[in-house]
């Protein structure tokens, strides 16, 4: 996301001082030229089309259910949900941050929370009630959607550049660097480094910086995270990664080093009324803007 509101939820901060994490590769630091810019944009758009994300405009909403597991001490600190292992159902309006999460297991089974134009609400005994924002749940709601739609959200960023090639775990990748305002690290925006599998032309990994953190612990901006997308399945022509694994800092070959993983068992487009996501019809729709946040 062009601002820093989304990435913070994935990786909890540590008590550490230091400079901002920087995902610029040597290729990017050597300068973004018209050639590297065009090549980066071509790679990202080709991957976007190959994943079927050009079909998103045929749909208004989607929902998915799955099991979310946060691992270890850091997972316990950083988890956006009350429990480290939870079955969840999400509902989203595409290209916005309007969504809902329902807890399908644990102590909060049957509870629902949502965001509408960045206003937080819960469904309780009095029905839908807008209230002071639960910061963790709000970040979780927005983050899961943003990373589900990541290539579509990033393709129009103002700074996109080819960033080199990389070999990892016996696979070959093109790297594409994405950010806003300036390639150099700065507090106002995050950086992304997309790993596009050369053979499949799919984004299988994405690195992301952490410029802010809802835990408000010092030093978190010196850390970054990475997400591994796998188990792509075609849903109405869109290839949805049904397994998403997050690591602290760069990707790891051993999955057991993960911080967090969500495994999706069902996904569908347009299987509920979009009006469900807009319980307050008087709120102005803000789309993917941060207005009202």
Image (cartoon, rainbow, N blue to C red):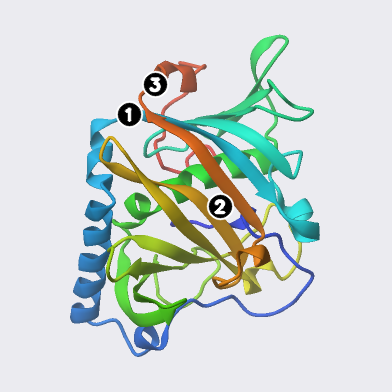
Q: Residues within 10 Å of mark 2 (few under 14, many from 20)?
A: many
Front: mark 1 or 3: 3
Return the residue at label 3.
Answer: 271
Q: Earlier in the sequence, mark 2 or mark 1?
A: 2
Front: mark 2 or 1: 1
Label 2 residue SS: loop
Q: Alpha-carbon distance for marks 2 and 1?
A: 23 Å
Q: Position of residue 81 (x, y in %)?
A: 70, 40
Return the residue at label 2.
Answer: 5
Q: Alpha-carbon distance for marks 2 and 3?
A: 28 Å
Q: Residue placed farthest to the top in the image? A: 126
Label 3 residue SS: loop
Name which residue lies at 42% across and 78% down. Answer: 170
Q: Position of residue 78 (x, y in %)?
A: 72, 53
Q: Earlier in the sequence, mark 1 or mark 3?
A: 1
Front: mark 2 or 3: 3
Return the residue at label 1.
Answer: 60
Q: Position of residue 191 (x, y in %)?
A: 46, 68
Q: Residues within 10 Å of mark 3 (few under 14, many from 20)?
A: few
Name which residue lies at 78% across and 52% down. Answer: 76
Tags 2 and 1 in contact by the CB under 8 Å rule?
no
């Amino acid at each position: 996301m062009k601002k820093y509101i989304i990435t913070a939820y994935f990786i909890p901060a540590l008590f550490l001082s230091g400079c901002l994490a920087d995902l610029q590769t040597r290729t990017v630091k050597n300068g973004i030229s018209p050639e590297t810019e065009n090549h980066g944009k071509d790679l990202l758009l080709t991957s976007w089309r190959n994943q079927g994300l050009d079909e998103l405009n045929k749909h208004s909403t989607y929902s998915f259910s799955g099991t979310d597991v946060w691992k270890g001490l850091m997972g316990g600190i950083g988890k956006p949900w009350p429990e480290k292992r939870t079955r969840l159902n999400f509902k989203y309006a595409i290209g916005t941050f309007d969504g809902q999460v329902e807890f399908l297991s644990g102590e909060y089974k049957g509870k629902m929370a949502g965001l509408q134009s960045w206003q937080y609400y819960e469904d309780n005994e009095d029905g839908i009630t807008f209230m002071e924002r639960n910061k963790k749940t709000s970040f979780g709601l927005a983050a899961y959607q943003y990373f589900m739609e990541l290539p579509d959200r990033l393709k129009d960023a103002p700074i996109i550049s080819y960033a080199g090639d990389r070999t990892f775990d016996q696979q070959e990748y093109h790297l594409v660097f994405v950010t806003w305002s300036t390639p150099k690290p700065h507090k106002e925006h995050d950086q992304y480094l997309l790993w596009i599998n050369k053979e499949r032309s799919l984004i299988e990994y994405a690195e992301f910086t952490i410029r802010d953190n809802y835990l408000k612990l010092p030093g978190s901006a010196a850390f970054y995270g990475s997400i591994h997308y796998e188990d792509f399945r075609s849903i109405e022509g869109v290839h949805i990664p049904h397994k998403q694994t997050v690591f602290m800092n760069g990707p790891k070959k051993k999955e057991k080093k993960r911080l967090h993983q969500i495994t999706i068992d069902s996904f569908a487009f347009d299987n509920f009324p979009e009006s469900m996501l807009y319980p307050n019809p008087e709120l102005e729709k803000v789309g993917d803007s941060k207005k009202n946040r």
